[in-house]
Image: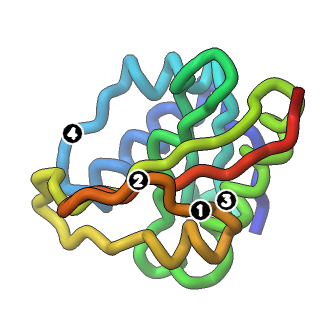
Amino acid sequence: MEIRPANINDLDSIIRLYESELLRKANPVFIKTSIEMYPVFIALEGDELVGFVYCRKFSPDILEPANILVKKEFRSSGIGSRLLAEVERVSAGSYQSLILVNSTLYKEDSEKRDASNFYLKNGYVVILETKGSTVFSKDLGSN
């Protein structure tokens, strides 16, 4: 399994994985902008893209991993944790913390998994809970 930074040549593969796993249209402009401006990592099994994480700026000192996705048959193998760890590693010098939102309120055509245990296992803490959403944060210790 190879984890590496994404580049613009990976855009089509990211979109295909997004749409095949989530059964909805991706936003190519948003993903392209993420690749150009923020940490984006992909997971490859041979030549096959099996996971990705892309980010956006939440505030000047907080980064939000906007989407973490691992292909269904590769889940629970540590790939998501490795992708998230790479974002944390490269972001620590530029951002104070990462913030993530896990919500059950998004309209999904596919079955959405509750990622709460994943975030807690990776050192995130709950900073806000509502009936349908949980907001997690992790201090990166920069600045």
Q: CA distance from mark 3 to mark 2?
A: 34 Å
Residue ID for mark 4: 25
| Residue type for callout 2 | Leu
Check disc 3: other Cα within 10 Å, few if <14, some if 14-19, many if 20+.
Answer: some
Depth check: 17 or 62 in front? 62
Q: CA distance from mark 3 to mark 4?
A: 22 Å
| Residue type for callout 3 | Leu
Percent from the top left, x then y, of residue 36? 63, 17
Residue ID for mark 3: 44
Residue 128: mark in rendering: 2
Q: Closer to the N terminus: mark 4 or mark 2?
A: 4
| Residue type for callout 1 | Val
Q: Residue 50 sits in which quadrant?
A: bottom right
Left or right: 84 in relation to 119:
right
Helix, strand or loop for disc 4: loop
Q: Which quadrant would the N terminus be assigned to in this image?
A: bottom right
Helix, strand or loop for disc 1: strand
Q: Are marks 3 and 1 in contact (CB under 8 Å)?
A: no
Q: Closer to the N terminus: mark 3 or mark 4?
A: 4
Q: Closer to the N terminus: mark 3 or mark 2?
A: 3
Q: CA distance from mark 3 to mark 1?
A: 29 Å
Q: CA distance from mark 4 to mark 1?
A: 31 Å
| Residue at 55% in and 43% down | 99
Q: Are marks 2 and 1 in contact (CB under 8 Å)?
A: no
Q: CA distance from mark 2 to mark 1?
A: 9 Å
Left or right: 107 in relation to 64:
left
Q: CA distance from mark 4 to mark 2?
A: 29 Å
| Residue at 54% in and 37% down | 64
Residue 125: mark in rendering: 1
- In this view, 34 is above or below 40: above
Residue 133: mark in rendering: none
Q: Are marks 4 and 1 in contact (CB under 8 Å)?
A: no
